[in-house]
Amino acid sequence: MVADGGTTLWWIWPIALFAVTFVLGMVAVLGGVGVGVLFGPIVGAFFPFHLDFVRGAGLLLALTGALSAAPSLLRSGLASLRLAMPLALVGSIASICGALIGLALPTDALQTALGVIILVLVGLMAAAKSDDYPDVGKADTLAAAFGLQGLYFDGVAQRKVEWRVHRTPAGLAAFAVIGLVGGLFGLGAGWANVPALNLLMGVPIKLAVGTSGLAISIINTSAAWIYLSRGAVLPMVVAPSIIGVMLGAKTECACFSSRRPRSCGAP
Amino acid sequence: MVPIEHKIYARWVDWGTRLGLGVLTASFIAYALGLVEPLVPPQQLTRLWALPVDRYLAVTGAPTGWGWLRLLGKGDYLNFIGIAILALITVACYVRMVPLLFRRGERLQAWLAIAQVIVLLAAASGLFDGSH
């Protein structure tokens, strides 16, 4: 296919990228899996782009997906800006550090580490449980200071759900680690944000999913700017990927409009 | 039950994302169809995109930081307008939140928002573009 080094058939790659990301967008809607976490390993393994450009594109892809989902989540009350703000601030600083470290490390070491991270991630996803309405006895001091509590309407249960959080320092630490890993490998972080919010901090699962998306849109912005500043963003990789994922997610959402709203448009 | 800042934040993100995606799609079509001459022609890009970013920059003379603004006449760098819009949405939303939060007396949240804006602007400033 690329006997001449691919110079004349260059257009095959953006088309292939568009096709793959279109499918990823559909899979994300069907399975509720973040595209940001699938993109890096799949494109890094099967496409000829250097991992630096794949990670830059992965971050922008996760960012765009999170931005697209944020308006409906905020309007429906299924994401809390108040809850996301302190966590995203810590996550942003850590993700900048992660991006800088990632761009300084040798590619071989990064590829090996990415493989290990993916295995850990699969294990986490398989083992992680969720708690619809965790029992939070008393908010901790930090949570009280930040005002991390509120009320949202659960459309399925048809009732108002009151929430508050505990273990806020541990939650901030978790978001620092998650931000570092996300910036380092160019991954979306819903796979880790949701358990941290739900199981560690006691946020009801629906609010945890929505707030995780909002936090990704903030955290990934900072890491994405590092990759942009360092020149690690190739429009030929980024643009077809973003367009493919967005169209894939919208197609799947249109086909399965009866699906739970939280899974639609949140690649 | 949905706070006013959620509604405003949602509106800004919604329009910003539509604008960013629209600009990115239009500029990519222009780039891919060769309507605007790129800095690095796609035929050459296939030999270069497997290089680490440092070597890619050295070979192509591609810019770092905000240097892409000088190359907006090139098809590939035209795409950076849409990408930059997408990456600036959160900053704009947070800046919009600050006076709202101060007006409601939520000083801690307002300072958190200011701190976040500073972090994002530091990341976007080019301070970490490797030349410092």
Image (cartoon, helix red, strand yellow):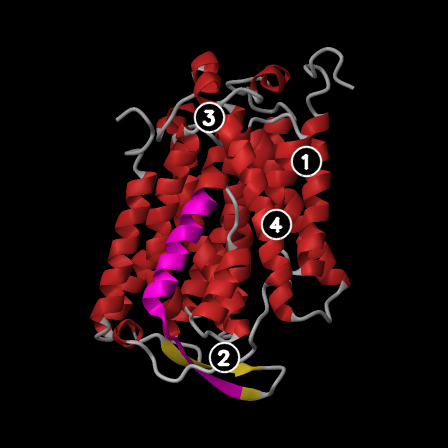
- Which amino acid, mark 4? Val
Image coordinates for residue B72, horizontal then vertical, percent? 44, 27
Does residue B11 show up?
Answer: yes
Tag 3 residue = A106
Q: Do marks 3 and 1 share a subunit?
A: yes
Would you name the residue on which mark 1 appears?
A: A17
The magenta region covers A160-183
Q: Is residue A169 magenta?
A: yes
Q: Residues under labels 4 and 1: Cα distance?
A: 13 Å
The residue tagged with tag 3: helix, strand or loop?
loop
Label 2 belongs to which residue? A134
Say which quadrant the C terminus of chain A sits in. bottom right
Q: In the rendered structure, which disc, 4 or 2, sits on the residue that comes first in sequence?
A: 4
Q: Which mark is residue A35?
A: 4
- Residue at point 38%, 26% (across, down): B64
Callout 4 environment at 10 Å: few (<14), some (14 to 19), or many (20+)? many
In the depicted structure, whether residue A48 falls above or below residue A8 = below
Residue B79's spot in the image, x, y percent? 51, 33
Q: Is residue A180 or residue A17 the one in the foreground?
A: A180
Label 1 marks a residue whose chain is: A
Gap between marks 2 and 3 measured at Cα:
42 Å
Labels 3 and 4 positioned on one and the same chain: yes
Disc 1 marks a residue whose amino acid type is: Leu
Under mark 2, the amino acid is Pro
* Tag 4 secondary structure: helix
Q: Quadrant of residue A148?
A: bottom left
Name the kind of residue labelled 3 in the image: Pro
Mark 3 belongs to chain: A
Question: Which residue: 46% across, 26% down?
Answer: A106
